Image: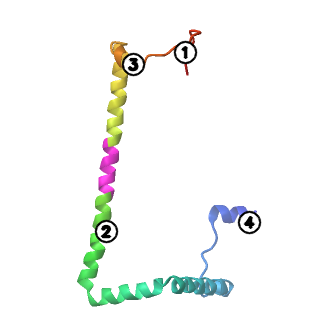
Amino acid sequence: MGKWKNIILGEKMPDKDDPKYREKYEKDVEAGRKFARVTRIDRLAGHVQRFAEKHRGVFLGIVMAIVLGCLAVNIYHFTRAYRAHREQKVSSQEASRMLREGLDNAHTMIPIQKNEDGKDQD
């Protein structure tokens, strides 16, 4: 029954100073540091931090430009999706209108070819 309770309610959030979780926490932190060293993310982060400290205004400008650029791209895609949805609705209404009118536009339909037996070809 304890497993179901943990699945539904979740487990207690471990505290890094709790002796029960301390060893696991230290292993996880060391694994993260090793990954950062191997991929050189730690050096990149150091360079970015030094640049941000030297040029605060430029750094904030770059960050805000990225954020506003992402916002603009999202708004652009939302409007394209909204317009595409409206066009589909209009085209389906056009198809319904053509069906209601009947076969007045029979010349636009593809003729069905028959075999020698008189059966339709697939």
Q: Residue 2 — which label? A: 4
* Residue at 42% over, 84% down: 44
**Residue 101 percent coordinates (x, y):** 33, 14
* Magenta span: 74-83
Under circle 1, the secondary element is loop
Q: Position of residue 90 (x, y in %)?
A: 32, 31
| Whether label 1 touches label 3, CB < 8 Å | no
| Label whose residue precedes the other's in the sequence (1 or 4) | 4
Q: CA distance from mark 2 to mark 1?
A: 59 Å
Question: Looking at the picture, does residue 82 appear above or below residue 50?
Answer: above
Cα distance between the residues tagged 3 and 4:
66 Å
Label 1 and label 4: CA atoms lie apart by 65 Å
* Number of numbered discs overlaid on the protein picture: 4
Kind of element beneath mark 4: helix
Crowding at dot 1, Cα within 10 Å, few <14 / some 14-19 / many 20+, comes out as few
| Mark 2 and mark 4: Cα distance apart in space | 44 Å
Is the residue 99 above or below the residue 57 in the image?
Answer: above
| Contact? badges 3 and 4 (CB < 8 Å) | no
Residue 119 percent coordinates (x, y) = 57, 12
Kindly identify which numbered label has been placed on residue 109: 3
Q: Residues within 10 Å of mark 4 (few under 14, many from 20)?
A: few
**Direction from residue 36 to residue 99 in the image, left or right:** left
Q: CA distance from mark 1 to mark 3?
A: 16 Å
How far across and how far down the image is residue 54, in percent? 28, 90
Would you say the residues marked 2 and 3 are in contact, meaning their CB atoms lie under 8 Å apart?
A: no
- On the image, numbered disc 1 is attached to which residue? 120
Q: Quadrant of residue 111?
A: top left
Residue 8 seen in the current view:
yes
Q: Say which of 80 and 122 sits in front.
A: 122
Q: Quadrant of residue 105?
A: top left
Q: Is residue 17 above or below residue 119?
A: below
